[in-house]
Image (spheres, rainbow, N blue to C red):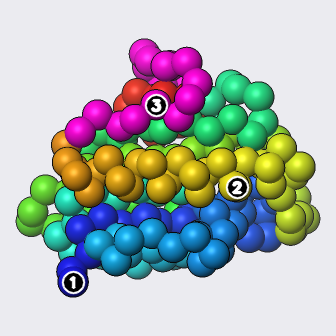
Amino acid sequence: MTPRLLVAGVGNIFLADDAFGPEVIRALAHRPLPPEVRVHDYGIRGLDLAYDLLDGYDTAVLVDTARRGHTPGTLCLIEAEAPDGTVVPEAHGMDPAKVLALAAHLGEEPLPRVLVLACEPELLPAGDEDLLPGLSAPVREAVAPAVDALHALVRTLLADPAAPAPPLGRPMESGPPRPAALPGTAAG
């Protein structure tokens, strides 16, 4: 069966809470998603993710951290907007907006719908700080709820890839994204 949906963990396991995406993918090994879903830990390999976004998926769900101004460990679901040409594509690195721009630049077909299941980080190294392996306590506690959220989200998206994303059990957040977030709206 050809996967119709991609769940992609992104982040650097050596940079504290940036390891959220890979940790959620690791936790999914104990609660697998249906066979119509391809689950993959991309880590910091943005070029690999860009090419995989061109493989004909209906939807892609990126699992990552994003500063949205919430309490650390808060989960948000962000609907990413299609690249508009203002973000410069980058082949090295894992800035999701730049990865989407690269995929749009590489492909002739439209990109799949992209959602981001994001966790508010508590600790992200800035600049040239030392490596900080390990998640902070609130982000570590968000891993299991993220797995639950993915199971609910995948069930909805497999039934209808264009369906509105289900709320994550928290009040809706809408309006323009905060500076560190991807373009789009969020339910948090």
Q: Which residues are magenta?
A: 163-178
Q: Who's the residue at 22% across and 52% down the image?
A: 159
**Percent coordinates x, y for residue 163 in the rendering:** 23, 39
The prevailing secondary structure element of the residues shown in magenta is loop
Of pointers 3 and 1, the one earlier in the residue sequence = 1
Residue 89 visible (yes or no): no
Left or right: residue 179 versus residue 128 is left
CB-based contact (under 8 Å), mark 3 and mark 2: no
Res 31 label: none
Label 2 secondary element: helix
Could you say which disc has been placed on residue 1 in the image? 1
Locate residue 7: give its quadrant.
bottom left
Check residue 143 in the rendering and tell me which mark sits there, or answer none: 2
Residue 137 x %, y %: 89, 49
Q: Quadrant of residue 81?
A: top left
**Res 130 → quadrant:** bottom right
Q: Which residue type carries mark 3?
A: Pro
- Circle 3 — which element? loop
Q: Is residue 136 above or below residue 10?
A: above
The x, y position of residue 119, in whole percent, is: 65, 44
Is 136 situated left or right of 30 in this image? right
Q: Residue at x 40, y 27 (%)?
A: 185
What is the CA distance from the residue labelled 3 to the residue labelled 1?
A: 29 Å
* Closer-to-camera residue (20/164): 164
- Of labels 3 and 2, earlier in sequence is 2
Count of numbered badges drawn on the protein: 3
Q: Which mark is residue 167?
A: 3
Asked if residue 40 is positioned above or below residue 77 in the image, the reply reads below
Q: Residues within 10 Å of mark 2 (few under 14, many from 20)?
A: many
What residue appears at the point 53 percent right and 47 percent down from the top-left corner? Answer: 149
Q: Judge whether 47 appears above or below 62 on screen.
A: below
Image quarter of the C terminus: top right
